[in-house]
Each structure stands twice: as C-alpha cells, then as structure tokens.
Amino acid sequence: MQLRSDAVRCGIPRAPHRSLLKADGLTDEELKRPLVAVFNSRNDIIPGHNNLDKICEAVKAGIYMAGGVPFEISTIGVCDGIAMNHDGMHYSLVSREAIADSFECAVQGHAFDAAVCIPNCDKIVPGMLLGALRVNIPTVFVSGGPMLPGHQPGCSQGATTDLNTLFDGAGQVAAGTMTEEELKYFEDTACPTCGSCSGMFTANSMNCLCEALGIALPGNGTIPAVYSERLRLAKHAGMKVMELLEKGICIKDIITEAAIHNAMECDMAFGGSTNTVLHLTAIAQEAGHPITMDDWDAASARTPHLVKLQPSGPRPLIDLYAVGGVPVVMHELGEAGLLDRSALTVMGTMDEYLANCTKPADGEVCRTHDNPFSKVGALRVLHGNVAPNGGIVKKSAVDPSMLTHTGPARCFDSEEQACEAIFAGKINPGDVVVIRYEGPAGGPGMREMLTPTSAIVGMGLSKSVALLTDGRFSGASKGPCVGHISPEAAAGGPIALIQDGDQITVDIEGGAITLHVDDDEMAARRAAFVAPAPKHNHGVLAKYAKLVSSADKGAYVS
C-alpha cells in the first residue's frame, strides 16, 4: 500500500533521507516498514506523566510486534495543580495550542504513517487530539492512567482523599477547623502514586472521553497508572494503530458528528469536568462538526446522570474501574437509546463495541439508565443578562440548597484579589463572588479557579456563597461555581459592568444568571466602559490573546 513515509524512504532521491534514518540505527529491513510516531508527553514534574516512559516502551513493543517502526516524539505539558493560583496558570490552556502545533509540525515534517498518542493530564489530551485531527492519520490514544487515592489516617479502606483535600484543607486551616499538622498528613498521603489525580477531574474526564470518542481502547480512562494492566493496554494500543493503518482508518473517520454526540452523552452521564465543554467544543470545531452551548444544553436535558465520582460524590475513579469502567456507562446509554450507533471506534462499529466490550451497570457506582442519580446531565448551561452567550456549572457538585441563590455582588478583577478577600474572611454568607478579566483573552489563558472555590468550601461558605467568573474551574472544583461566562469582561461582556452590591440571582435549575439592574443603568455603565489594556505585549500570552476565540467557542485558536 501507498504510505506517507514513502516520501522519506523510497527511491534514489531519498538516499540522503535514508542515511539520516540509518543514523538513528534503522536497518534496511526496518526502512521497508511503516513509520509510526509515538507522541509522548513524559516529563519529570507532572506526576501523571513521570511513568510514561514505561507506557511508551510498551506502545513501541506493540508497534514492533505488529510490523511497524516506532519513533518517540516528545511534547510539553503543564500540571494544572502545580500551576494553580499564580502566574503559571496563564500558561495552562495556552499549552493546549502549543501541543497541537508541535504534533502537527512533527508528524508533517517527518511524514509519519500513523501515531499513538500518550498523554495523561488536562490540556495534553485535547492538545494531542487537536493536532491529530489536523494531520488526519491513523491514531490511537493511550493515557498514563489515574493515581490511586489516598486515605484518612489509620485506614487503607473507606473514605478516600485526593488533591482536593489539600485545596479544601488550606481553607479549613484559615477557618480554624483543621490544624497544620493534619494538613501535613494529607500533603504527604493524598497523592500516593504516579498518575492523574484520582477523581473525575479534568484529566480523567478527558481520558474517559477518549473512549467515548472511539479513539482509545476500553480501560484507557480508568485502569490505574500503577497496574500492569496499563502496560498491556499500551501494547495493544501499539498493535491497534497498525490494524487501523492496514484498514486505512484515520482519526477523522472515527471522530465524526456521531462520535462527538456520544462523547457529550458520556460526559453528562459520568459528570465530567466543566473543562470538557471547552475542550470538546474545540475538538468538534477542528473535526469539522462544530457544536454550540445550545447543543450542550440539549445534551444535559436528555441525558441521565449515572455516575457520581469525586468531586460530585465520595467515590474515587478506581471505583468506576472496579465495576467495568467507561464501557459500563456506554452500555447504559446504549440501552436508553442515547448513543449514535453510526459511530466507528477503534474496536469496530458501535454495534460491535456494545456487543463485545460492554456490560450492564452495577447499580451503585454506575446507576442503570432507568434509575439514575438525576434524569438530567451532571453539567448545566446557564444564560441570562450576565452571560448572554452562556456559562457552565457542574450541577452534580452543587448542594441542593444552592441550586437557586440571590445575593449581593462582590467584584474582583483578578483571582488574586478574590483569594485575598476569601482568606481574610471578608466574604459574607449570601455573597455572589464575581471574578473577572480572567477569560481566554483577558486573562489571558482563562485561569482555573480551584484555589478560590476550595477556599470557599474550606471556610464553610459553599452552602451560602456563589461564584461567577469568565475564567474556568478545575475538575476538582465543587459548589455553585459558574465559569466560562461569555462574553468575557475584556471583550466588554456584561460581567465587566457588575458593581459591588448589585443583586444577582444564580438559578442553576432554571439555567439563568440574572443581574437585577435596570436597562437604563446598564446602558449608562456600558457607555462609560473602557476596555483595559492587554496584560501582555510580547511572548506566547500576547499571541494567544490576539488569536483566541471566546469560551463558548472552545477558546479555540485557528
């Protein structure tokens, strides 16, 4: 068959190219085989990625066994937890685009025939997905897997701990309800192994959605990082990409409109991070099947909520693994008639996938489709005069008492200002905290707000205080926190015009955010509004701010 790599391997004019490949140690025999990129985000600093050398070796073994020649290619990554609540978080979402660009450059520059992507954490998964869609070659994803959860003192079973325990704990120490010694225990034990953080946070949400999109083998999202099963999965991923190459199945043949639909259904069913809305919207755009906030709203309305993992419930991700993982969720959605069966997966057609890879729900970790936690999805889109183009909240992580809340606005023009006020005890029960100028362009980079949301929880205010932002949230955030508010403040969105003391109603059940200020007053404020100067005039953040779309469009850079 004709291969892309023929452009660097075949014919007399390619003798120089072959010489350079032989400098890598390749033999004449290997030069007759397909060349496969193994796109690895392994590094020493991200705990979800420092085991990817072993995953990569397993993938390469699988490729070799199936007749290909693998080449490891490296990319960057940013750990959102380490980047949180300082200037580093400006770079997290920006890294998604840098990863996509690097994938495109490496694959196109070397004419690879196929690719296996090895991501794990938050922006690396969608970054590789965006890059893979641009080049459209046979591609399989295999993640590094989630870490095991920590445990409370004196036990190895029962209630678990995770990174969120630390962020909440910082607020509890400030409130005097936890000692520094207790916090130190959780600091030492809450992240006990390598892997992505142990709840249904952004990294694990995206790795699970790779299964729903059809581009990863069953188990990709849930097999723990430290299990040998993860290495076997990686070998099978290497073999699977060679099968796709033989069949001529490229990633755009799999990520179709049907696949996007199925991923949205799964996201609502297992209560993924609000960041998945941002990333899937961008992925759908790159795939040529754009979706809107109205599409997300419709998905939420029709999809039952079947799984409540941390932060929506007490269970860690490993509990979903124990009962069968994402295929169990897929089974229940299929039984409910909510999957588009025209979708193709790396395992074959959707009908083949459902017949061979899935099993019924256990009824506890994953509810059956006719006995869900909720008849509607875990995520909720909100509109209104604060967010004309929408905002997003993880409804499943909100206490029922806060599904509707009205209170006075407390406005802050940066995350730092808000955190200072929260930790100083200056936020009162009933307040609506507004954090603005943290959007895709205004931030720039749309910083995650795990520190302020966790501080509100730790200070005992999660059942009395709501938070609105044009930034975004960690998958670990919980409480009545509405992010991605569009248009953002830097673009002159209504969130920029809110003043301290204004009454705001956050109606999560009704899907609305309402600023109780009359039209004449809003018109006067708008007339007086002056957009702030860009925060950066050089470097990657300046470029990003000039090119990025709004949050409701996926903060997409085309």
Image (cartoon, helix red, strand yellow):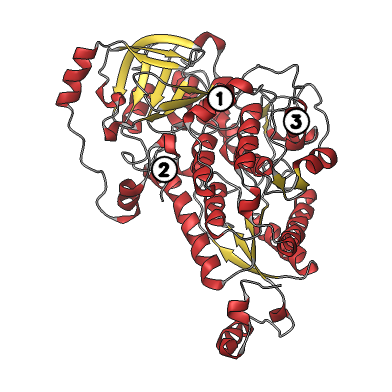
Circle 1 or circle 2, nearest the eye = 1
Q: In this rendered view, identify the residue nearer to me: 375 or 182.
A: 375
Q: In this rendered view, identify the residue nearer to me: 148 or 323.
A: 323
* Disc on the earlier residue, 2 or 3: 2
As helix, strand or loop, the secondary structure at mark 3 comes to helix
Label 2 close to label 3 by CB (< 8 Å): no
Residue at position x 51%, y 71% from top?
109
Q: Which numbered disc covers residue 298?
A: 1
Circle 2 or circle 3, nearest the eye = 3
Q: Which residue is mark 2?
A: 89
Q: Is residue 191 visible?
A: no
As helix, strand or loop, the secondary structure at mark 2 comes to helix
Query: Is the residue 169 above or below the residue 371 in the image?
Result: below
* Disc on the earlier residue, 3 or 1: 1
Amino acid on which the number 3 mark rests in the picture = Gly
Amino acid on which the number 1 mark rests in the picture = Ala
Tell whether 111 sits left or right of 545. right
Label 1 close to label 2 by CB (< 8 Å): no
Q: In this rendered view, identify the residue nearer to me: 258 or 490.
A: 258
Amino acid on which the number 2 mark rests in the picture = Met
The spot of residue 361 in percent (x, y) is 80, 27
Q: Which residue is mark 3?
A: 334
The spot of residue 232 in percent (x, y) is 79, 54
The spot of residue 250 in percent (x, y) is 65, 57
Residue at position x 56%, y 38% from top?
202
The spot of residue 429 in percent (x, y) is 40, 10
